[in-house]
DNA sequence: GCCGTTTTCGGCCCGACTGTTTTCAGTCG
């Protein structure tokens, strides 16, 4: 049975929760949490790596013990230590710790004093006012526990970056307009442009007499004020999103921005380097002894630590600190580097606009080329094109290219990869196209081996160029299908095929780790919006965000090239 | 439990806010 990294990470996290309740060494607990994070962000399953004979103890934060435990989970599906700990401590206590305001000490106190072992019992104890009687607890804590139990159900998921973007922007506007406010910036995973965001961390600088904190907690969209302090406040918006606001002195702005941008793992790695130079970094600055020697800007902070500026998107402790030390940071691709888009639909299949409308929108947005890639006939539900309709569309594209100046429309298709790996259209017509994107839209549940071979067989086709949305995942909705990404990438390299980074904010597929893997292999990636409407062209920026998180440079991206150069790259022999 | 240009033992980030305290513990980020 395949065991995925997510399951390994889950077991480590559960174990960490329970150990914490038992009062285990906090650093031991942290070691499990760090390991969970490391494993989850690997581009390949640990199971595969083990099968290939790789030594997992070489991974950062994984020693002999944890490597052995990963092996145990992969081989047995479960971890003996976790099972034992769950028996000693009751598995559901770990769930209680996820309630905001309830940590290991309080769970243990409630459990020991009242015998509470489940969420239902916790609610009953709170409703019977048993909790407020405990030492160290009171009415407010009891009320909070009840409130958080109710909120828990609809508050578990992280929010997609694209959904958070407009919320963050209107908050920024609101705060910028308040009297005395100088700088406003959203830090955290939002600034790192992570595909999903847990909460918003906003930093501001302002005059001492600015009413910004009161105006923040009084913002229209605020549903609940969790904290309201002088330098820090926290609210929950009607959308369910949590927002933290911090007021920082101007001399500390850079240090605070750096600190609150994270990630935590990255910050710790850099702080270690600082320690080696007898420096201390915190949100107030870089200190030598009691002297603040930097802090007003992020650049200053990096300079004092002796590192070049590391772009926020890279700050995940995935090798960027080592790369910075060696002065080998990538020069990340930018939105303005993109010259074209290689995946777009029209009304001929499931797009919302005509060929001409899509072409004009692309031209207006400054693109030099746009590939029209409607669905093929297998996707009958969206009237996918057969050979005849595709040829008609190709003629219309030729005519449009003669008429329109300033943009080139490429004749393409998003052809279905059928279950056996064959393509859904005749070889002849595929050979006449400028661009063939091949995608999977059916049979998501094949075994990993079959799914992988299906895709490789599709890439054997001499007209195949780019694998569309390579894992099929939909963020928060559908898991990736089982596929051996490393084999797929190696096969693509051998055949002269490429990967798509689908920039639809619901997809962002390839993910960041896969992009990094592609780059390491020297496999180029197309950043494509998969546009179904003229307005979708805007989504290219989400693709760029993800590409940057995946360390991609302009040269690693197919569509940073002029059409003439791209055409040569697409030529297979 | 991890890790090593202070190292194989003894560190591992630390400050703000809240609620419960009457000087601080717990939690969070």
Image: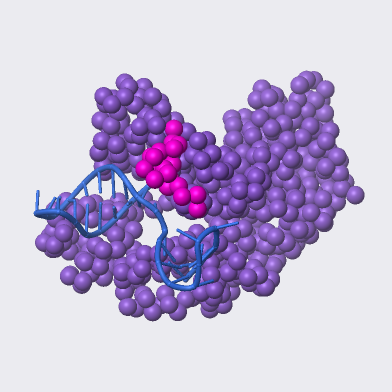
Chain colours: A purple, B blue
Picture coordinates of residue A206, whole percent (x, y): 34, 26
Q: Nearer the viewer, residue A210 or A279?
A: A279
Residue located at (39% from left, 32% from top)? A251
Q: Is residue A316 visible?
A: yes
Q: Nearer the viewer, residue A559 or A360?
A: A559
* Whether residue A476 is situated above or below residue A64 in the rendered picture: above
Q: Is residue A558 left or right of residue A539?
A: right
Picture coordinates of residue A210, whole percent (x, y): 28, 25
Picture coordinates of residue A186, whole percent (x, y): 44, 36
* Whether residue A333 is situated above or below residue A35 in the rendered picture: above
Magenta residue check for A545: no
Residue located at (44% from left, 32% from top)? A296
Q: Quadrant of the N terminus of chain A?
A: bottom right
* Whether residue A404 is situated above or below residue A220 in the rendered picture: above
Q: Nearer the viewer, residue A106 or A569?
A: A106
Residue located at (32% from left, 78% from top)? A88
State which region is magenta.
Answer: A276-296
Residue located at (78% from left, 28% from top)? A408
Q: Quadrant of residue A64?
A: bottom right
């Amino acid at each position: 049975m395949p065991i995925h990294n997510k399951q390994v990470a889950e077991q480590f996290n559960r174990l960490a929760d329970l150990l914490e309740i038992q009062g285990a060494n906090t650093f031991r607990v942290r070691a499990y949490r760090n390991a969970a994070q490391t494993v989850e962000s690997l581009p390949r399953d640990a199971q595969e790596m083990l099968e290939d004979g790789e030594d997992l103890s070489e991974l950062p934060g994984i020693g002999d013990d944890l490597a052995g435990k990963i092996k145990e989970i992969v081989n047995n599906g479960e971890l003996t230590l976790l099972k034992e700990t769950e028996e000693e401590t009751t598995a559901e206590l770990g769930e209680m710790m996820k309630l905001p305001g309830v940590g290991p000490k309080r769970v243990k106190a409630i459990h020991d004093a009242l015998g509470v072992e489940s969420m239902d019992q916790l609610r009953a104890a709170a409703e019977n006012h048993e909790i407020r009687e405990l030492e160290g607890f009171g009415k407010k804590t009891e009320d909070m526990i009840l409130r958080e139990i109710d909120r828990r159900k609809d508050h578990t998921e992280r929010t997609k970056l694209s959904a958070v973007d407009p919320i963050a922007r209107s908050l920024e506007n609101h705060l910028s307009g308040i009297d005395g406010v100088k700088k406003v910036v959203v830090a955290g995973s939002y600034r790192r442009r992570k595909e999903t965001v847990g909460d918003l961390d906003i930093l501001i600088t302002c005059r001492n007499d600015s009413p910004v904190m009161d105006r923040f907690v009084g913002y229209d969209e605020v549903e609940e004020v969790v904290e309201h302090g002088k330098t820090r406040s926290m609210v929950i918006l009607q959308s369910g999103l949590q927002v933290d606001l911090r007021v920082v002195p101007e001399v500390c702005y850079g240090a605070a921005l750096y600190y609150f941008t994270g990630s935590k793992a990255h910050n710790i790695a850099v702080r270690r380097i600082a320690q080696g130079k007898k420096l201390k970094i915190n949100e107030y600055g870089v200190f030598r002894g009691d002297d603040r020697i930097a802090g007003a800007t992020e650049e200053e902070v990096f300079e004092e630590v002796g590192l070049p500026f590391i772009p926020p998107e890279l700050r995940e402790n995935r090798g960027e600190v080592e790369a910075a030390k060696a002065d080998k940071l990538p020069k990340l691709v930018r939105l303005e580097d993109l010259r074209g888009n290689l995946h777009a639909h029209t009304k001929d299949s499931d797009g919302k606009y005509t060929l001409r409308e899509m072409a004009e929108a692309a031209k207006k947005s400054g693109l030099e080329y746009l590939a029209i890639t409607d669905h093929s006939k297998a996707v009958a539900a969206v009237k996918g094109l057969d050979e005849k309709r595709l040829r008609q569309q190709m003629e219309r594209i030729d005519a449009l290219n003669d008429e329109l100046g300033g943009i080139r429309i490429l004749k393409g298709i998003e052809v279905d990869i059928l279950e056996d790996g064959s393509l859904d259209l005749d070889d002849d017509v595929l050979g006449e196209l400028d661009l063939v994107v091949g995608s999977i839209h059916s049979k998501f549940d094949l075994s990993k081996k079959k799914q992988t071979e299906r895709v490789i067989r599709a890439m054997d086709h001499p007209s195949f160029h780019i694998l569309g949305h390579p894992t099929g995942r939909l963020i928060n909705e559908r898991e990736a299908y089982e596929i051996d990404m490393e084999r797929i990438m190696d096969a693509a390299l051998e055949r002269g095929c490429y990967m798509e980074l689908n920039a639809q904010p619901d997809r962002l597929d390839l993910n960041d780790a896969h992009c990094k893997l592609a780059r390491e292999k020297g496999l180029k990636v197309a950043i494509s919006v998969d546009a179904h409407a003229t307005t979708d062209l805007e989504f290219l920026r989400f693709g760029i965000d993800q590409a940057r998180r995946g360390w991609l440079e302009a040269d690693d991206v197919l569509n940073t090239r002029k059409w003439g150069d791209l055409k040569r790259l697409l030529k297979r022999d």
